[in-house]
Image: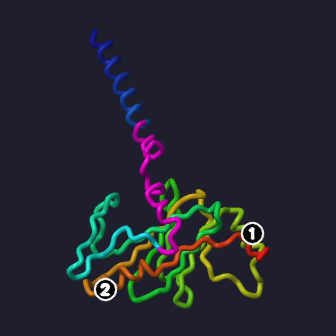
């Protein structure tokens, strides 16, 4: 009798473990409001959508609906992209405030860069599909190499998170402005630019 009870208990525990693991693994696929979906509103903007704006003087930080508890010294903005419209270009000028850009797809971050990679004070990150990347390489001028940081995205849709750190309270307005000053645009495909 006790051997049957032990066998039934172990079988139940194994089945419960399998169901638990399957449920946890299915959550990202079944979630309706994942990060990629939440950022789609910023696809039509030519600058990052502010996600977390630092409080400045009398202006408190706005409440955030979907971010985890944000760092009170980091301004955050997001640019969504759809590479079927063309490569996504994220351009920024460097300043005294540290800046980072992180590209995310459906399965998490796949590339991150800081302002330390800037060339002559400018940081140009171009996210593209493999076909767009191959076309860009074919179109490159050997005498004038591109200064863009080109990244092949694993997914057609995703978003770029821009973060600017304000080390001092007096730098908070500058951090908010630095996020707003970043440019997020869709590059026209090469065959369209050739027709113009």
Residue at 35%, 85% in the rendered image = 174
* SS type, badge 1: helix
Q: Residue 148: image x %, image y %?
A: 62, 79
Q: Is residue 56 left or right of residue 25?
A: left
Element carrying mark 2: helix
Q: Quadrant of residue 87?
A: bottom right
Q: CA distance from mark 2 to mark 1?
A: 41 Å
Q: Which residue is mark 2?
A: 171
* Quarter of the image that includes the N terminus: top left
Q: Is residue 177 above or below residue 3?
A: below
Write down the region rendered in magenta.
Answer: 23-47
Residue 162 placement (x, y as % from top left): 44, 72
Q: Is residue 56 above or below residue 48?
A: below
Q: Quadrant of residue 31?
A: top left
Total tally of numbered discs in the picture: 2
Tell me where residue 22 appears, x and y as whole percent. Answer: 44, 36
Question: In the picture, residue 97 is in which quadrant?
Answer: bottom left
117 vs 178, left or right, is: right
Instruction: From the viewer's perspective, tell me whether residue 134 is left or right of residue 184.
Output: right
Q: Position of residue 55 (x, y in %)?
A: 26, 76
Q: How is the image coloured?
A: rainbow
Main SS class of the magenta portion in the image: helix
Residue drawn 38% across and 35% down? 20
Residue 135 tag number: 1
In the drawing, what numbered circle is on residue 29?
none
* Residue 28 magenta: yes
Mark 1 surroundings: few (<14), some (14-19) or many (≥20) residues within 10 A: some
Q: Mark 2 vs mark 1: which is more N-terminal?
A: 1
Q: Where, quadrant-wise, is the C terminus in this rendering? A: bottom right
* Residue 50 included in the magenta stretch of the image: no
Answer above or below: position of 84 versus 87: above
């Amino acid at each position: 009798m006790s051997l049957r009870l032990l066998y039934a208990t172990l079988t139940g525990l194994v089945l419960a473990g399998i169901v638990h693991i399957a449920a946890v693994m299915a959550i990202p696929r079944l979630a309706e409001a994942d990060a990629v979906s939440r950022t789609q509103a910023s696809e039509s903007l030519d600058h990052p959508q502010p996600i977390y704006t630092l409080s400045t003087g009398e202006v408190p930080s706005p409440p955030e609906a979907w971010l985890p508890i944000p760092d009170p010294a980091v301004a955050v903005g997001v640019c969504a992209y759809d590479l079927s419209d063309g490569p996504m270009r994220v351009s920024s000028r460097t300043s005294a405030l540290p800046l980072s850009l992180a590209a995310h797809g459906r399965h998490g971050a796949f590339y991150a860069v800081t302002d330390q990679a800037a060339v002559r004070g400018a940081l140009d990150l171009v996210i593209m599909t493999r076909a767009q990347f191959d076309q860009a390489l074919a179109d490159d001028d050997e005498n004038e190499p591109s200064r863009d940081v080109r990244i092949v995205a694993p997914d057609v849709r995703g978003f770029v998170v821009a973060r600017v750190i304000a080390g001092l309270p007096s730098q908070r307005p500058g951090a908010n402005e630095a996020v707003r000053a970043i440019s997020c645009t869709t590059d026209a495909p090469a065959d369209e630019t050739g027709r113009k």
